[in-house]
Amino acid sequence: MLYDYLIVGAGLFGAVFAKEAKNRGKRCLLIEKRSHIGGNVYTEAIEGINIHKYGAHIFHTNNKPVWEYVNQFVEFNNYINSPIAFYKDELYNLPFNMNTFSKLWGIRTPMEAKQKIQEQIQASGDSEPRNLEEQAIRLIGQDLYEKLVKGYTEKQWGHLCTELPPFIIKRLPVRYTYDNNYFNDRYQGIPIGGYTKLIEKLLDGIEVRLNTDYLLQRDTFDAWADKIVFTGPIDAYYKYACGDLEYRSLRFETEVLDMENYQGNAVVNYTEKEIPYTRIIEHKHFEFGTQPKTVVTKEYPMQWQRGDEPYYTVNDERNTQIYNAYKKLADKEKRVIFGGRLGSYKYYDMDKVIEAALAASINI
Ligand SMILES: Cc1cc2nc3c(=O)[nH]c(=O)nc-3n(C[C@H](O)[C@H](O)[C@H](O)COP(=O)(O)OP(=O)(O)OC[C@H]3O[C@@H](n4cnc5c(N)ncnc54)[C@H](O)[C@@H]3O)c2cc1C
């Protein structure tokens, strides 16, 4: 065999696995069907600004070893994600915190805010929530739901909140401090120079072939390596034998604007239904950019069909059953490891993907 490991997919999972396998003296070939490395964390420079090509990515973690791991390869800046919500010409801070409540109700103290939310929750009754709308109101009350959750969620899922099951929203965190930091994690930031730099560092010294789809030449590649690490969609690997897994997709509209600063923040969520996009990202603010121009991206949620880019898994009952059937097949494989968000059909934050790739490569 030419290689010990054939790694399919140059996203974070594939890159971390390849790095660790190489460190253990394994011969690795990494193939990627796209024309670039990085998977969905790929960034490319436009007007000197690092653009998050497949959606805004903020690194955040509570896992110190993972934080130290990534910091070996790149330095992270001190970006803190503090998104803003735009609803009918008004701006509100996210996540829901005292700044949001003060703007919404003209109040000042945590006690006033708690009372207001409690009143609204009580007014919603105490029967079992039958849908997402009832569930959300039970958690945060009518006002926050109407202005900041309803339209955004309906755009994201392509269904009315009254048609969506309650389990989609398990928690809607409410914070009674004036703190706009979206994440509670201990460590947070953006790699200085972009995520592609991180992946380049991980793949340093590893043979990579771009524009190469494993599924189109699997017999050839299978004959080259002892083991295969597959980070593409698990249903595609098994030729959809147990059915198609579903996803939600996104369409991105990116523009260069001839101005220094468009919206004054990296992330602005559009929470009303009438505006078709869910967010506008102004990429330069992730890295405190001072370039003369700016680049913004509008995110439009889209229904997904086979062939579209799969972004979010839909972990409902039907898809869970289908995935479990594939998982049974996967567990019987002697030479294939499935990993990453598509191989495990799971929404994974970046730190969790790194953790999983480190765990998968530990005893190889
Ligand atoms: C819109 C969006 C925003 C996100 N924001 C955040 C965030 O702010 N913070 C955070 O921590 N996480 C975020 N995430 C999650 C993050 O993107 C993932 O954790 C990470 O990208 C997963 O890496 P991966 O290697 O599993 O998958 P991917 O990055 O998808 O890599 C898989 C690679 O395999 C390749 N591939 C697939 N099939 C084949 C084949 N047959 N042959 C060859 N190559 C193949 C694909 O082209 C792809 O490059 C976000 C995700 C989305 C969708």
Image (cartoon, rainbow, N blue to C red):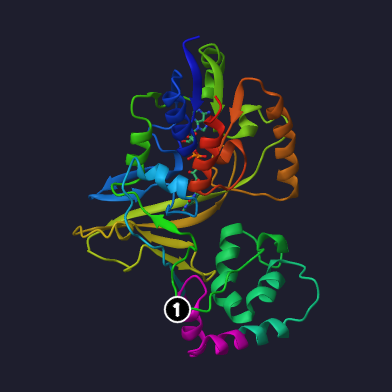
Q: Position of residue 324 (x, y in %)?
A: 73, 38
Which residue is at 72% across, 44% downward?
Answer: 320
Question: Which portion, as a residue range, is magenta?
Answer: 87-116
* Residue 10 visible here: no
Please determine whether, in this image, residue 352 is positioned above or below residue 228: below
The residue sitting at 63% across, 80% down in the picture is 142
**Residue at the right extreme, as displayed:** 127
Task: Measuring from the top left, give residue 175's x and y in whole percent.
Answer: 53, 75
From the image, tell me which residue sits under label 1.
Answer: 178
Residue at left offset 56%, top offset 90%: 112
Say whether residue 308 is magenta. Answer: no
Q: Is residue 141 left or right of residue 40?
A: right
Corner quadrant of residue 135: bottom right
Residue toward you, 110 or 91: 110
The image quadrant of residue 229 is top right
Q: Residue furthest left?
A: 292
Q: Residues within 10 Å of mark 1 (few under 14, many from 20)?
A: some
Image point (36%, 45%), residue name: 71
Which quadrant is the C terminus positioned in?
top right
Amino acid type, callout 1: Tyr
